[in-house]
């Protein structure tokens, strides 16, 4: 073959090979630049596909069932919830007698014969009482009795009742359970419904009157003035508490708080109500002393022999305290095995016992610790 033709074909082959090589390089370069510019591109792993993360359907909650339950509970219990209205007599002042004052709260019907649970602080000091039923009709009510220390009261109305609430077992409550509060906030918005959860159980709050209110249920369901005495319900439609108070802040600081509501446990309320319905009152153990709590500061001021306990200021005549030989100036330091101090109040330690029960008291007299056996009497609420 002609050497010129051979040379010509070699040049063409070299050019074609060079173009293929440059095309491969250029294509790779362009692909790299595209990937760099588009950070959302994902790369497939051909050897082991990446696992897909998904939320199981069992973890997706629907509010429809809960809302339906709440609605059903409200419809069932609402006829048993009442507004309690009371009248407090006007007071004599330098300028004359003030007008009568109207107070209000809530309550819940617990029996076919018209017994109603409410709070002591709703009815305390009233001269007349009435209840407004769910249908708006108002009926006169009788105060059967009340227990100051548990803040409970039992009322009664005559005639056919529109509904009866079931009492549940508050010992079974767990924090996080959904609860429903029904009441008449401000005395105007009858049978208002709020929903929350059980925040805690077994709470104890200082009443500021020398004793603590015990076995309270804490909830974030909104409780306002006028809700007192209304029921706190579980999703089974059972009363598991009687709403009693709300805390807005602390006496020791300027801090404020929200959603701190408290209810008397249903087991406590039912026990006291049963006693009142059967006997006409709830009996508390009676010792017959007036006293002042002793603190380290008070002990220092008055140079007392001990810096804790209950200092007896007066003793009722013919009381268990007088019969046992206690006298004013003695400091009760222990009831049974409970030391009386800032964490364990005298009255709450005493209320652990029953009327007519014999107890051992330790007391300080003239720098000596002595003991005495006392048979408790019976004290009924006013």
Image: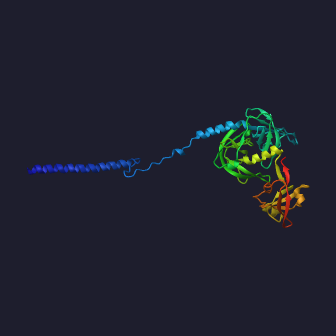
Residue 292 visible in the shown view: yes
Tell me, yes or no, if residue 265 can be seen here.
Answer: no
Residue sticking out furthest to the left: 2
Which quadrant holds residue 332?
bottom right
Residue 190 picture location, percent across and down: 72, 36
**Of 337 and 134, which appears nearest the observer?**
337
4 vs 233, left or right, is left
Q: Is residue 43 left or right of residue 54?
A: left
The residue lying at 33 percent from left, 48 percent from top is 31
User: Residue furthest toward the bottom?
Assistant: 368
Residue sitting at 32 percent across and 48 percent down? 30
The x, y position of residue 297, in whole percent, is: 79, 62
Q: What is the x, y in percent for residue 74? A: 67, 38
Q: How many marks?
A: 0
Q: Nearer the viewer, residue 261 or 336?
A: 336
Q: Position of residue 310 (x, y in %)?
A: 82, 59
- Colour basis: rainbow
Quarter of image, res 321: bottom right
Query: Residue 183: which quarter of the image?
Result: top right
């Amino acid at each position: 073959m002609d050497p010129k033709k051979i040379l010509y074909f070699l040049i063409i082959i070299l050019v074609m090979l060079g173009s293929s090589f440059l095309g491969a390089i250029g294509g790779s370069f362009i692909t790299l630049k595209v990937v760099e510019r588009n950070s959302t591109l994902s790369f497939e792993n051909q050897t082991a596909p990446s696992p897909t993360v998904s939320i199981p359907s069992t973890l997706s909650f629907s509010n429809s069932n809960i809302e339906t339950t709440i609605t059903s509970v409200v419809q069932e219990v609402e006829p048993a919830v009442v507004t309690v209205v009371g009248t407090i007599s006007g007071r004599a002042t330098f300028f004359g007698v003030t007008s009568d004052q109207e107070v209000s709260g809530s309550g819940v019907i617990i029996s076919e014969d018209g017994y109603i649970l409410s709070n002591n602080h709703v009815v305390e000091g009233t001269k007349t009482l009435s209840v407004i039923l769910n249908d708006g009709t108002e009926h006169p009510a009788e105060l059967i009795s009340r227990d100051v220390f548990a803040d409970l009261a039992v009322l009664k109305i005559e005639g056919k009742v529109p509904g009866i609430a079931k009492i549940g077992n508050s010992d079974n409550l767990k924090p996080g359970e959904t609860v429903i509060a029904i009441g008449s906030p401000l005395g105007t918005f009858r049978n208002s419904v709020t929903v929350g959860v059980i925040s805690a159980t077994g709470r104890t709050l200082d009443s500021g009157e020398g004793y603590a209110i015990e076995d309270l249920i804490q909830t974030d369901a909104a409780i306002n003035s006028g809700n007192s005495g209304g029921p706190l319900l579980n999703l089974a439609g059972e009363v598991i508490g009687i709403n009693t108070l709300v805390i807005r802040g602390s006496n020791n600081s300027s801090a404020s708080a929200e959603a701190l509501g408290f209810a008397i446990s249903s087991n406590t309320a039912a026990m006291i109500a049963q006693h009142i319905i059967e006997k006409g009152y709830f009996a508390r153990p009676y010792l017959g002393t007036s006293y002042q709590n002793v603190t380290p500061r008070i002990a220092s001021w008055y140079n007392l022999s001990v810096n804790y306990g209950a200092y007896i200021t007066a003793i009722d005549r013919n009381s268990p305290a007088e019969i046992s030989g206690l006298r004013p100036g003695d400091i009760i330091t222990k009831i049974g095995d409970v030391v009386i101090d800032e964490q364990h109040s005298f009255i709450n330690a005493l209320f652990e016992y029953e009327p007519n029960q014999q107890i051992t008291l330790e007391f300080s007299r003239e720098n000596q610790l002595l003991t005495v056996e006392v048979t408790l009497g019976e004290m009924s609420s006013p």
